[in-house]
Amino acid sequence: MLSENKKTPLFKLNQPDDTYKFQPLPEPFGEYPYRLKPEVSLPDPHKMVFQVAGDTGGIKSPAFQKLIAEEMGKQYDEAKNKAAQPSFLYHVGDIVYHFGEADQYERQFFTPYQDYPLPIYAIAGNHDSDVNLNAKVPYSSLFPFTSVFCGKTPRPVPFGTKLNRMSGVQPHVYWTLQTPLANIIGLHSNVPKFGVITEEQKSWFINELKQAATEHTDKAIIVCVHHAPYSADFNHSSSLPMINFMEDSFQKAGVTPDLVLSGHVHNYQRFNKTYADGKTVPFIVCGAGGFDELHWLAESDDILYTNKSEIFDTVTLENACTMQHGFLNLEIEKTEEGHQISGKYYSIPHQGLKPGEDATLFEEFTYFCNHGDKQVVQ
């Protein structure tokens, strides 16, 4: 259980402005409004399971990223029935470190995920978007990322060896994945420490929220952004730019999503935010997917941080798993009354797993959203 002094998000004080690190976005690969509707076969048309991981790159200690990939794949292979098998992995950013160079993808992505049996969709993290000015081969921001994940048709990736994956067909670096039971809106929050999202992307996002609302009786609305709006960790803590962006967009769209997923912070945190209409929205940080440096929670009375903000009045940290790697399984189930979002977070000790040992179920949670009504936690 979390202690009472660790029940709220934090802001880290006196942080330098690094928005100068912003990188221009590449041209889109698909037509506006950048939606992808892949073939997702569901044995039970009312239930869909998928996996979430972030910050998987393992530049120093590749064993952790390999363990995460193996454990996620194992859950697909060993599922008791087909309805319980995940359909895909949604990556919430930072596939490679410390810069998004092409020569990092083979050992930080292609090799550890060579046996992962499912499609992988992704938004880019700050490290994926950053440019190494000292790279032997000059490149533009996100060129390697888009070479791996974006395109009009699948094609061979132009770098790496012995690759067993073709490129993805995501239409842009911000885009909507249209699945049978959820519209998953993926944002691009760029390089700076607390994220930057342009007005052009914001306008697109508001329109995507409105579109998703027209299908809300059939599909959950999930928003993914790499930089976590809310966090209580020592390294980043909460992102005021992302909080302001989200809340202003929700208000202008007249739409509140059912779930917000992020990475960036290298641990697991689950926050509940209660809105004026009574709806509770989980904001989940899932960024312990393989990078060797993990983040613990800061103490709220540490003079380097503060929880004194009215922004946090309706936000509560419900649970956290720190100093262990892990990943999230999400299940979306459609019922006559609404849709249910259930999650299972699995953790792996920092010292790794013993032979024959599986990832540990750290926690389970369930949120239920009545159609046209508020969302409640069960």
Image (cartoon, grey):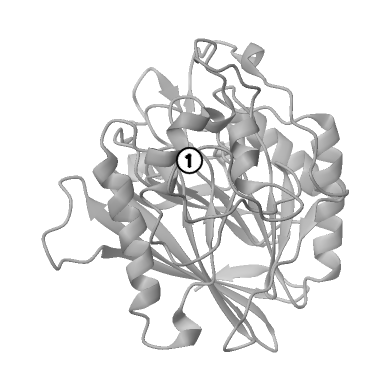
Q: Name the one closer to the observer, 192 or 166.
A: 166
Residue appearing at x 48%, y 17% in the figure: 13
Figure check: 336 above or below 161: below
Q: Amino acid at mark 1?
A: Ile
Q: Name the one closer to the observer, 190 or 150.
A: 150
Q: Quadrant of residue 183?
A: bottom right
Local secondary structure at mark 1 = loop
Q: Quadrant of residue 336?
A: bottom right
From the viewer's perspective, tell me whether residue 241 is left or right of residue 109: right
Rate crowding at label 1 as few (under 14), some (14 to 19) or many (20 or more) other CA atoms within 10 Å.
Answer: many
Residue tagged 1 = 95
Q: Quadrant of residue 73?
A: bottom left
From the viewer's perspective, tell me whether residue 340 is left or right of residue 57: right
Q: Is residue 254 visible?
A: no
Percent across and percent down for residue 23 are 68, 21
Percent across and percent down for residue 12 are 47, 23
